Image (cartoon, rainbow, N blue to C red):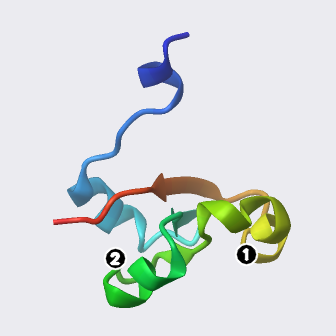
Amino acid sequence: MSLSQSNPEIPFEEVRERLRDPAFVLVNVLPKEAFMAEHIPGSVSLPLAEVSQRAREVLSDLTQEIGIYCANFT
């Protein structure tokens, strides 16, 4: 399986729709400062540097589908 098949990009409009679904969580892996400056409403902050320490705390529902973004949105 290619990287694009295993990690598909989700169009922003689909992300906006999916944020209404409690079975989906959008994770912002940018540094906390970037999250505080600007983020997609409804997303949660889990900076990449903190994933190994805080992932279970932030993503406690293991049944949720996880979307990740790692760049500022436009």
Q: Does any portion of residue 60 appear in the rendered image?
A: no
Residue at 24% x, 65% y: name it. Answer: 73
Q: Is residue 49 above or below residue 7?
A: below
Q: Residue furthest left?
A: 74
Give the Cα separation between the discs numbered 2 and 1. Answer: 17 Å
Residue at 57% x, 72% y: name it. Answer: 22
Task: Name the residue carrying label 1.
Answer: 58
Q: Does any portion of residue 2 appear in the rendered image?
A: yes
Amino acid tagged 1 = Val
Q: Front-most of 27 and 24?
A: 27
Question: Is residue 6 left or right of 69 when viewed as pictured?
Answer: right
Q: Front-most of 51 and 12?
A: 51
Residue at 30% x, 67% y: name it. Answer: 16
Which of the numbered marks, if any, corresponds to residue 6? none
Tell me the quadrant of the picture where the C terminus can be found: bottom left
Residue 56 picture location, percent across and down = 83, 67
Which of the numbered marks, if any, corresponds to residue 40? 2
- Assign a secondary structure to mark 2: loop
Residue 66 picture location, percent across and down = 58, 55
